[in-house]
Amino acid sequence: MKSISILGSTGSIGTQTLEIIRDNPEKYRVHALTCYKNEKLLSAQIREFRPEIAVIESRESAARLADEFPETKILYGSNGLEEAAADSGADILVNAVVGMAGLVPAYRAIESGVTIALANKETLVAGGAFIMREARKKSVDILPVDSEHSAVFQSLQGFDRKQVRRLILTASGGPFRMWKKEDLKDVKAAQALKNPNWDMGAKVTIDSSTLMNKGFEVAEARWLFDMPEDRIDVVVHPESIIHSMVEYEDRAVMAQLGTPDMKIPISYALGYPERVPNSMESLDLVSVGRLTFEAPDTDRFRCLALARDALRAGGTYCTALNAADETAVRAFLDGRAGFTDIPDVLSRVLDSHRSRDEFDISEILEADREARAAAEKYLSELK
């Protein structure tokens, strides 16, 4: 039986992970649960799964939970999150925290030798070279949970990675795939939060609509699979049935197909190298009818090109890009910036960024702080 800790247990990935655990009580038990501020749902999860550790952001919420569940160690804040991540009582840490907040806990887990099922893309976008270096030192496996990277991971099984020619990541194209460039300036947050295929949190959904999410996934793939940026392609696939592909030297292409449901990659990461049965319906290709593909338009959706620029520049440019994007997306959701302001702010932050070529965790965090401040400055100058 595997012991599972979940960072971000009340979010989309976290709740689906718990559904898998609930359906497989003979395979998994919960060691730790953490959330930001959804005290009511976390309380219900603690009551059902009886973890040894639970974490919430506020001290007041933690005190109430401690009174309610005296048998569970209740922690709070970022220190509590890091302590839960580093606890070696877990076999697997599911890192489903949103944003940069997931990076330090991932590092703490690596220090403790805990296998990571990674759904927090910022860990590798902002700190890829450093995180993968530390994981190799500690012989820690990082298993992808993102559907695209899970698809690549699955398509690599049984093959010599030295024979890989390129990786092909697929993208739904988002809700504005057919919109004209001049109309994008009028996009409202409510429109951008309607992904055509996937049920995701607000930040990831906005990133999907700008194609920033796909740019971040290129960066993730670069580090997860040790693949140069110029050998990672992106293709828009509106049906979201093929989740990604691997092309080999003989031009054979291996693909992983499935319905657009995150339970498949979560289940594969938890069960690896085994596959865990579930109650999902089988993929019906006849009902799907057709699979279509097109090239991404980086003139209309500049964020993908900016991500590639940052990845090629190296150093802490991707750290700065991630920080600027978190800041700009929040401003868009708050009504302080327009949809097309997002890539403008990112571009200005990258142009002004002072990169570090060699860096540790403290320098990553400092680059992150600088980029956030720069993004706020540029946002304040918007008219």
Image (spheres, helix red, strand yellow):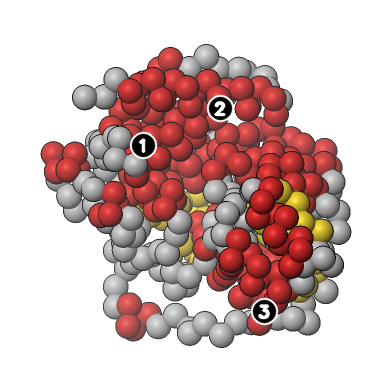
Of the two numbered discs 3 and 1 in the rendering, the one whose residue sits closer to the viewer: 1
Left or right relative to 191: residue 90: right
Residue 254, x across and y down, in percent: 51, 62
Q: What element carries label 1?
A: helix
The answer to whether any part of residue 292 appears in the image is yes
Q: Is mark 2 on a helix, strand or loop?
A: helix
Please tell me which residue is depicted at 82% across the width and 41% down the height of the picture: 111
Q: Can you tell which mark lies on residue 340?
A: none
Residue named by callout 2: 368
Which residue is pictured at 43% across the width and 15% down the height?
A: 352
Please give the label number shown on residue 22.
3
Identify whether 202 is placed above or below 2: above
What residue would you read off at disc 1? Answer: 331
Which image quarter holds the N terminus? Answer: bottom right
Disc 3, disc 1: CB below 8 Å?
A: no
Q: Distance between the residues labelled 3 and 1?
A: 37 Å
